[in-house]
């Protein structure tokens, strides 16, 4: 068990129950968290909320700047990097909200998103989790803000061309992004970049699973919540900018993601399924590498060389992970 200091002194044990507890995990992201917290105060009105920042042993060592600018924030410093799931669970132990919002540091509210999500969550008796529309910095929609649980079929066919050509196909689980309905839509998975959950649901499923250091913990949480009898929702009338990928390098992120997804399959679909998943995805990676190599011969006719080079590095990394990772015994 990590040696974890206690939250800031003066924190009342019998706190006033908040409507929402907003939990950030920091790892060298202080500048982003500052902007995010400012946007929370600018866009959120009429509800009681608290902000908790868990510092995951950031090498930068500048997390105290947040306390200076936002003295009402609860700051928890972990002596070791607990990973995303572990740090969020630590933050939860110091929160008092009836509802919890797990919010990435690299997010910025551009609407009263917290109010809107909370209103929907409170009005839906069967709801466990709700997420909102995530935007890139150019204000285009991030299709990754909702998705389906990973399967062999949807991962093999996870090609951007196919997703754009048939966006409403249930295989992708992103049809709600293209709906004009003002009502929240039932979805399988909500991105952990902005995930609001009822306290009762979070406690019922025993918090985030710490089987994952980073990536797939949101998949796992949404799966457990659905298995516990709750429904996960998405609302398009709340928007947040998510800059994305600011806490890890692309290659490192790819490695962590593709270690986590097969683990999710092992845990929730069985070891046999997980083993087949690894084999099929390794073959898929080989096929994609061949296609990318062929495309690169034709210059920029199919895609810019920089994009092809990036794709080549990505799928080489994925193949390496899948060939060296074995199912748990």
Image: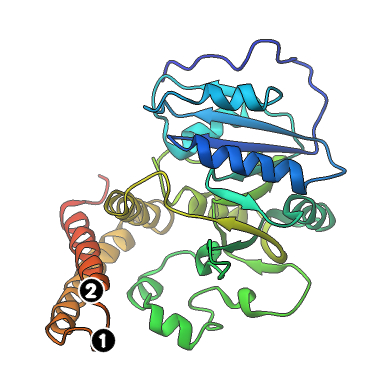
Depth check, front residue: 255 or 225: 255
Looking at the image, residue 317 lies above or below residue 47: below
Compared across the picture, whether 308 is left or right of 215 comes to left
SS state under label 1: loop
Residue drawn at x 46%, y 39% is 84
Is residue 304 at all visible to an observer of this figure?
yes
- The relative height of residue 187 versus residue 86 in the rendered view (above or below) is below
| Residue 198 seen anywhere in this rendered image of the structure | no
Answer whether labels 1 and 2 touch (C-beta < 8 Å).
yes
Give above or below for 109 relative to 281.
above
Mark 1 or mark 2: whose residue is earlier in sequence: 1
Q: Quick one: 156 or 163, which is closer to the camera?
A: 163
- Which numbered dot is residue 302? 1
Q: Judge by depth and name the residue closer to the eye, 271 or 200.
A: 200
The N terminus appears in which quarter of the rendering?
top left
Q: Give the quarter of the figure containing the C terminus.
A: top left
Name the residue that disc number 2 marks: 308
Q: Residue at x 18, y 81 (%)?
A: 291
The dot on residue 167 is none
Return the x and y of residue 43 as percentages of the image width and height: 76, 49
- The quadrant in which residue 157 appears is bottom left
From the viewer's perspective, tell me whether residue 185 is left or right of residue 263.
Answer: right
Disc 1 crowd, CA 10 A, few/some/many (<14, 14-19, 20+)? few
The colour scheme applied to this rendered structure is rainbow
């Amino acid at each position: 068990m990590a040696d974890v200091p206690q939250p800031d002194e003066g924190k009342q044990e019998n706190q006033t129950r908040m409507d929402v507890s907003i939990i950030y995990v920091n790892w060298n992201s202080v500048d982003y968290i500052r902007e995010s917290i400012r946007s929370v105060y600018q866009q959120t009105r009429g509800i009681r909320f608290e902000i908790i920042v868990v510092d995951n042993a950031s090498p930068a060592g500048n997390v105290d700047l947040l306390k200076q600018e936002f003295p009402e924030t609860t700051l928890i410093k972990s002596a070791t990097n607990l990973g995303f799931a572990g740090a969020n669970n630590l933050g939860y132990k110091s929160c008092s909200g009836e509802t919890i919002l797990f919010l990435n540091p690299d997010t910025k509210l551009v609407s009263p998103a917290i109010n809107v999500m909370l209103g929907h969550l409170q009005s839906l008796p069967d709801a466990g989790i709700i997420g909102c529309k995530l935007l890139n910095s150019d204000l285009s929609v991030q299709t990754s803000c909702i998705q389906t649980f990973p399967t062999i079929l949807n991962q093999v066919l996870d090609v951007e061309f196919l997703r754009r050509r048939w966006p409403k196909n249930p295989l992708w689980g992103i049809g709600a992004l293209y709906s004009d309905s003002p009502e929240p839509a039932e979805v399988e998975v909500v991105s952990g970049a902005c995930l609001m959950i009822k306290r009762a649901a979070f406690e019922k499923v025993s918090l985030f699973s710490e089987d994952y250091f980073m990536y797939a913990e949101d998949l796992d949480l949404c799966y457990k919540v659905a298995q516990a009898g709750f429904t996960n929702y998405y609302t398009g009338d709340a928007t947040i900018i998510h800059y994305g990928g600011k806490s890890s390098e692309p290659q490192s992120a790819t490695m962590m993601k593709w270690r986590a997804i097969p683990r999710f399959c092992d845990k929730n679909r069985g070891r046999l399924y997980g083993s087949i998943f690894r084999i099929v995805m390794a073959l898929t990676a080989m096929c994609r590498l061949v296609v990318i190599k062929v495309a690169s011969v034709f210059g920029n006719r199919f895609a810019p060389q920089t994009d092809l080079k990036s794709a080549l590095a990505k799928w080489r990394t994925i193949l390496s992970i899948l060939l060296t990772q074995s199912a748990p015994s």
